[in-house]
């Protein structure tokens, strides 16, 4: 069994309408599952095509809402350290959301 099938069987994966995802009680946020998790549940027979479609639509809407409020932040010293460790001290690292490039050698 995989992580997602274990969580599904344990009842940790919740429904909002036909969409399936994670529900965070403290913030009342419903976050639809990513496609790979949805397709795993579908191919193993836990959910049907209607749930796949509804979750896909809910995920798209959730992502659009996220980007309406997304504001890039200035990288902290810890961020720079982690990027340097992962990519090298003189690397150029791109923010995949905005396309902004950070030149690590400038830090």
Image: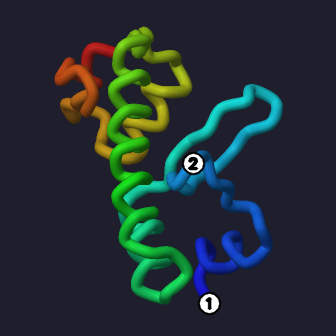
Picture layout, residue 75 above or below residue 28: above
| Discs 1/2, front | 2
Is 66 or 60 nearer to us in this picture? Answer: 60
Direction from residue 67 to residue 101 in the image, left or right: left
Up-down relation of residue 88 to residue 101 (above or below): below
Q: Position of residue 99 (x, y in %)?
A: 17, 23
* Residue 71 percent coordinates (x, y): 40, 10
- Quadrant for the N terminus in the image: bottom right
Q: Nearer the viewer, residue 10 or 80?
A: 10
Name the residue carrying label 2: 17
Q: Earlier in the sequence, mark 1 or mark 2?
A: 1
* Residue 34, quarter of picture: bottom left
Q: In the visual, does 4 lie left or right of 93?
A: right
- Please report the residue visible at 27 percent of the width from the left and 27 percent of the height from the top: 97
Q: Secondary structure at mark 2?
A: loop
User: What secondary structure is found at the residue carrying circle 1?
Assistant: loop
Name the residue carrying label 1.
Answer: 1
Q: CA distance from mark 1 to mark 2?
A: 26 Å
Q: Residue at x 43, y 11 (%)?
A: 69
**Residue drawn at point x = 48 percent, y = 88 percent:** 44
Residue at 41% from the left image edge and 53% from the top image edge: 54
User: In the rendered view of the protein, which quadrant contains the C terminus?
Assistant: top left
Task: Please state the horizontal and vertical placement of residue 86, each as a whole percent of the image.
Answer: 38, 47
Q: Residues within 10 Å of mark 1 (few under 14, many from 20)?
A: few
Within 10 angstroms of label 2, few (less than 14), some, or many (20 or more) residues?
few
């Amino acid at each position: 069994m995989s992580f997602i099938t274990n969580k599904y069987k344990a009842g940790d994966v919740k429904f909002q309408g036909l969409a399936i995802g994670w529900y965070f009680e403290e913030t009342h946020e419903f976050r639809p599952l990513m496609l790979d998790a949805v397709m795993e549940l579908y191919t193993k027979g836990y959910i049907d095509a209607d749930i796949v479609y509804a979750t896909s639509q809910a995920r798209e809407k959730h992502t659009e809402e996220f980007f309406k409020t997304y504001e890039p932040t200035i990288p902290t010293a810890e961020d720079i350290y982690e990027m340097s460790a992962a990519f090298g001290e003189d690397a150029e690292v791109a923010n995949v959301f905005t396309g902004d490039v950070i030149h690590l050698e400038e830090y």
